[in-house]
Amino acid sequence: MDNIFYFKFFKFLLFFFLSLGCSIFAQGGWQWQKPYPQGNALKSISFVATVANDGWAVGDLGTVVFTPDGGTTWENIDIGTTENLNSVYMRDDNMIFIVGDNGTIYFLYYDGTSLDITKQISNTTENLNSVNSNTNGCTWIAGDNRTILRTTDLGVTWNKQNVIYPFDLNSIHNIECTTAWAVGNDGFIMHTTDWGINWTFQSAPTNNYLFAVDIGTFNHIRAVGNSGTMLLSTDEGGTWTIEDCGTTAHLYDVLNIGYARAYAVGAQGTILETTDTGEPWVQRNSNTTATLYDIEDQYGTDDMWVAGHYGMVLKNSGIGTDFELKTGETRFWITGVEFIDNNIGWAVGGEHGVEAKDGIFMKTTDAGLTWIELSTHDQLNAVDFVNENKGWAVGEDGKIRYTINSGDSWGTQTSPVTADLNALCFIDENNGWAVGDLGEIIHTTNGGSNWVRQNSTTPNWLYGVYFVNEKKGWAVGLDSTIVHTTDGGQNWERQIIGASNGFRFTSVYFEDEMHGWVVGIYGSIFLTIDGSETWQEIESGTDKLLESVYFVDKTHGWIVGDAGTILHTTDGGFTWNHQFSGVATNYLVSVYFTDRENGWVVGEGGTILHTNDGGGPVTNVKDEEINKPQTFLLSQNYPNPFNPSTKIKYSIPNTSSPLLGGARGGLVTLKIYDVLGREVAILINESKQPGEYEVEFNTNNLPTGVYFYQLKAGNNVETKKMILMK
């Protein structure tokens, strides 16, 4: 059988691994620690089985999770795709259909001992949004751009139906092989009674997007959509009326149980239940404000299962009961992380949103396999430890918390500000700095017994701070702000970096007094190799917001940011490559490494990732290009001022264009000029291959003064200033 991958696993092994909290398919790279087993959005869940022990859920970035024990435990299953998966349907105990973006269709056959995975041919690249079947073997799929697919041979062949209406279709439901309903954007509803040969438009009393349709008994059909839209038909869609369900939240799924009972789920953690044909609808407690996408019943019981954002799976205990979180774990964003060694670490965070008010302290002593959580009424943004016992955390409203017992308990220190504090840095048990909104910088020299304000010279919000010793430090923030001090913060001076945009810088890190990096919005990366005398703007290869940067030495560093972005460098930040994070949309906020192999990333929705191999291989980069620069770059000479010699580094980009001095070779020149523009030395005048170079300039008999050095490669020219001081 073509395109079949066989995964053989016995149930006793499955339960063994689940009991250990380990993934059967665990590999290198980045792995989820929280939420467990993963934190990508789950868009669909299915328990439609006779035995009712096996359940499946699917979601973003190829996510598939499976339970063999009625939802007590869940485990990741790799079916070989990173496409977003939008719908799953268990036709029976053994056969499962999964559909997703770009025409993705998978057929799974699980006999309780082995799992066979078949990628089926859809003959379309449209996003497929919904799959539904019945016991007669008729399976239907609905998707974007009027796509309707149908099979009668378990997907060996899929036939595209002729639909004349130009709408994206979000959901389809059939009760027999001849009859089905589909709904889509702009209040669109259509119906077939002849196997889909002909589809009939049905008028709806709304123009809102409709996301789901479900056929109940006695001709009860419901459709739900934007802004709390709920439609009901009791005459096979001949007429549709608006039901008052008591919410304005977007509704993404609806399920009719028998005649009188029904459920709907949607945004803001909304779960609605009716046991009397919709009169009334009652909102059940979901214990979350995250978006919920799908609801299904568990065969043979009154229990309901819900799938949602951040990997959430929820379950109730029958009719009229609230829902409990089974996976997904935390409502907090994790905003700061630090490890003192490869086992002991801490993280902090807080609720997110307009009504957010609470926060969390977390600690692990086993590299993040388990975390001890301690709640607080303070929303926390950053954490820093100087040893195994002493640490500080800062957060909203100027809050400063500290511990002297490894985070087992936390006290409060008096803050001189009420603005939110966004970052902090301690260099020892006494000396620390914190920065925040409105350009606030505060400093302590006695471990936080007293904190005093410093004049940052800027009103801009500050989001990152780093000190290499008691004197030298940097803070970064809005409008490309970089402020620098050489006297412990008594005086701060803004640095002019010539940025190409008004960036919001979010994080700064220095490996020593000379080598530093700054990241921020629009994928911005800046680096310095001369102690911030000059800053170089680096191509990141992404336009995502970059939130945190960390280096373990002068060459190896990581950056994390929006939509699961993780970047890695092995050449000091001159080139950056993407690592596969396994995170689809979650915002990654902070990164920390203890060495080149062991690191952690935290972020939105309680996300905690861990790697023990440096994050694994890069992605979307040709092997021969990994360690080659992607941009034309001339670095500031070092030392500067100098006498009698100085070194100049430059990079030729990895490109096939000879105009750029690329892979086919090209002439590169590096020349020295005096202040009158006279050429005084030629350092380079030859063809160069892509790579990084360094040349030494000896001044010989040149007098003290200002000189300029100019690098040319094809159409690229860059000039910098240097000072000879004898």
Image (cartoon, helix red, strand yellow):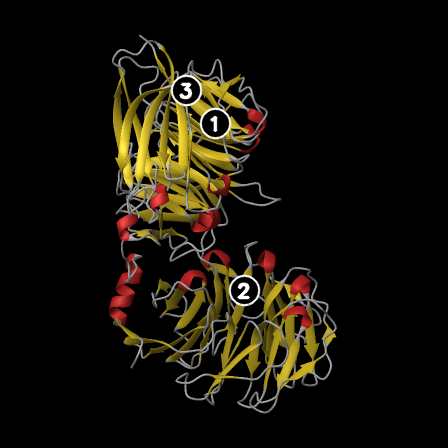
Query: Residue sitting at 25 percent across and 67 percent down?
Result: 13
Going from N to C along the chain, the mark reached first, 1 or 3, is: 1
Q: Nearer the viewer, mark 2 or mark 1?
A: 1
**Mark closer to the observer (3, 2):** 3
Name the amino acid type tagged 2.
Answer: Tyr
Q: Nearer the viewer, residue 626 or 227?
A: 626
- For the C terminus, give its image quadrant: top left
| Image spot of residue 406 (x, y percent) | 35, 32
What's under tag 3, amino acid-wise?
A: Gly
Report the side of 493 relative to 281 (left or right).
left
> Relative to residue 375, is residue 245 drawn left or right?
right
Q: What element carries label 3?
A: loop
Residue at position x 38%, y 68% in the image? 67
Task: Tell me which amino acid carries mark 1.
Answer: Ile
Q: Residue furthest front?
A: 678
Q: Which mark is residue 497?
A: 1
> Is 217 in front, or is 206?
206
Which residue is tagged 3?
677
